[in-house]
Image: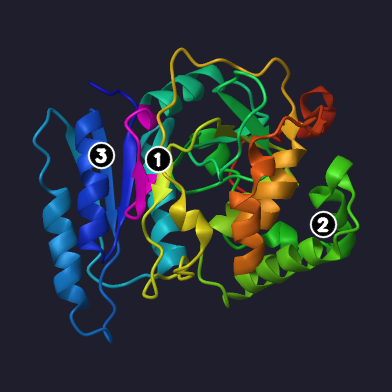
Amino acid sequence: MFNTPVLLLVFNRPEETRLVFEAIRKAAPRHLYIAADGPRINRTGEKELCDSVQQIVQQVDWPCEVTSLIREQNLGCRKAVSEAITWFFTNVEQGIIIEDDCLPDGSFFPYCEQLLEKYKDDEAVFTIGGTNLGYHFNGNHSYSFSRFMNMWGWATWRRSAVLVDYNMEKWKAQSFKRLWLQKKLGSNFFTLDYNWIKYWKSYFTNTTSGEVDTWDYQWIFTQLYYNKVSVFPAQNLVKNIGFSDTATHTFHNEHPVKELELSTITFPLIAPADKLIDLFYEDNFIKKVWFNYSKETLYRILRSNFLNKPRVTKTINFFKSKKHTSPVLKKPG
């Protein structure tokens, strides 16, 4: 039996939900939280899809306490997911969050559980991610650290969730947004990559205005604001199966991240020798693979031979800085 609570976020995709739910069934968590958004009024046939999804997630046939948050009307991605995460962490101190299009390997669950326990009192660590975007580690450590969380199958603590303001008032209050981002996003906290700065300035601004209907940029902003890090694994433990023309956000159907395969991590987990931010991963995978959508560039990066060649990994000794110290843990405002 698996003791860490799991939050499953579902909506209108029965085929993907069935696969993800089967992976959860194999893990057999003792506590399963299910949050379902409701159908959109103007979408023909969506109510039937939502009903089908809810029938799938009701098929709990293992010893499990199930708690559900089922919406009759559609709230949209931002409100539905943010309220579900808040609801989840009013009930639990730590847990795993899986969306209906994020298919986890079986080893993802004990990986999350062990690292949640290991870092539960280390406030510098913001989240535990399950996705690796194709990076082959130098060395035998099981995971590394980044300033950018990935939300395709992840885990965290209440102490992180209460820091997130989904209205991003702290971003609105930044008088010199470009300079603030330049400090936060660059190697050694400075950068001349103004396209990277422009990207985040645009998305943070459009998220606060409501033009981008999402919840996850708020988490990334919070991580940057408080100078925290996220764990990412040496192997890819979660496959995003939601890339399609009908998806809300992962609609780049030919995105090479779609081709990433599931792997299994080995135990016992081996911690890195030093607690360092891996800038090579950030610059060459998070920036160039996850957020850049040039098909030719992405395929060249993911499929070129340099991925398997020895390299000197660029890092920041983040954990020796005092900048990661958290404020008093309370809800923003």
* Position of residue 79 in the picture relative to residue 70 (left or right): right
Q: Is residue 129 above or below residue 46?
A: above
**Is 44 within the magenta?**
no
* Residue 181 disc label: 2
Mark 3: give few (<14), some (14-19) or many (20+) Cα within 10 Å: some
Q: Position of residue 21 (x, y in %)?
A: 22, 45
Residue 227 visible: no
**What is the basis of the colouring in this image?**
rainbow
* Residue 23 disc label: 3
Q: Position of residue 183 (x, y in %)?
A: 87, 50
Out of 200 and 311, give the one closest to the viewer.
311
Cα gap from disc 2 to disc 1, whole angstroms: 33 Å
Residue sitting farthest toward the front: 305
Q: Helix or strand or loop: what does disc 1 sit on?
A: loop
The residue at 40%/40% (across/down) is 262
Q: Position of residue 19 (x, y in %)?
A: 23, 49
Residue type at mark 1 is Leu
The residue at 86%/55% (across/down) is 182
The residue at 65%/53% (across/down) is 301
Find the magenta span and give its range. 98-109
In primary-sequence order, the first of circles 2 and 1 is 2
The residue at 82%/27% (across/down) is 317
Q: Helix or strand or loop: what does disc 2 sit on?
A: helix
Q: Is residue 317 above or below residue 299?
A: above
Residue type at mark 3 is Ala
